[in-house]
Image (cartoon, helix red, strand yellow):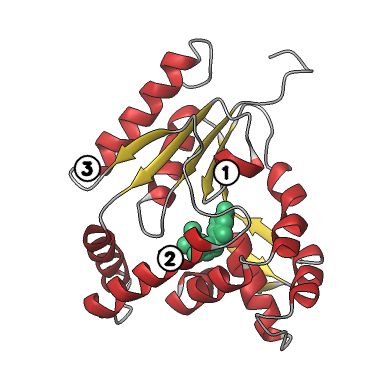
Amino acid sequence: MPLNVPAPVIAIDGPSASGKGTVARRVAAALGFRLLESGALYRLVGLASRHRGVSSDDEPGLARVAAALDVRFEDDGIFLAGEEVSAALLEESSGTRASEVARHPAVRTALLGRQRAFRRPPGLVAEGRDMGTVVFPDAALKVFLTASVEERARRRYKQLIDKGIHANLAALSRDLAERDARDSARAVAPLAAAPDARQLESSELSIDQVVARVVRWYREGNPAGGGA
Ligand code: DC
């Protein structure tokens, strides 16, 4: 790849529990690309700010926390100021807090450079809410992954139960709908498909089918692009 051409990006956006995380990880593995789970950064800001007693309404305070985030992404976990926080980040309360801090433009701006730094050869799969619209508008492929709220609540329920975490299907469904509404209604970088994104409704598809379709779309558009 010529030095002056930025590494290709596949942007996968969509609502909570649409399967973005699993799909992005599998597509990255299939193509040998790096992975950015941008939601983890908002979850980390939520956690770090809570530890420091910064309110989810204090935009300048949250932006300072975001800019100074002392985080390491390692193979064996995510470390915040040296402390392993992978399990804490997965809790529903971390998702809700992340969605609250993510409303603030100054927080989003503070995380932009950190997200773009993940873009390195041979390529990047980036998943979140605004990967195709704001963070990587020049992505080689943009996918907007959806599924019905019932199906997403069922998937999240199964994920939690499999991990031994107590869950309630009705409460999950309600929380997801609330989070969707907040993520879609915010003024800055709302959850929305980029005009040039390909829509993928996954309620009736298996993970394997979704992954295969994304990899095929990428290869069709980028015949020389990575992967075996
Ligand atoms: O993808 P996730 O559930 O880990 O994301 C948690 C919250 O972070 C989500 O409800 C909204 C916010 N978020 C965001 O605003 N922009 C992103 N690119 C990713 C996540």
Q: Could you tell me how far apart the alpha carbons at marks 2 and 1 are, in whole angstroms?
A: 18 Å
Residue neighbourhood size for the residue with mark 3, other residues' Cα within 10 Å, grouped as few (<14), some (14–19), many (≥20)? few
Q: Give the residue at mark 3.
A: 206
Residue 177, horizontal then vertical, whole percent:
35, 68
Identify which residue is drawn at 51% across, 46% down: 127
Residue 171 lies in quadrant: bottom left
Residue type, mark 3 in image: Ser
Task: Answer left or right for 183 relative to 68.
Answer: left
Label 2, ligand 1: CB separation under 8 Å? no
The circle drawn on residue 168 is: none
Q: Which mark is residue 131?
A: 1
In percent of the image, x 52 and y 51: which residue is there? 129
Left/right placement of residue 6 relative to residue 41 reads right
Distance between the Cα atoms at labels 3 and 1? 23 Å
Label 1 crowd (10 A; few <14 / some 14-19 / many >=20): many
Which quadrant: the C terminus?
top left
Decide if ligand 1 comes within 8 Å of the CB at mark 1: yes
Query: On the rendered structure, is 84 left or right of 178?
Result: right
Identify residue for label 2: 181
Name the residue type under label 2.
Ala
| x then y, percent, for residue 125 | 53, 38
Q: Nearer the viewer, mark 3 or mark 1?
A: 1
Q: Are marks 3 and 1 in contact (CB under 8 Å)?
A: no
Q: Confirm whether residue 170 shows in the render.
A: yes
Residue type beneath disc 1: Met
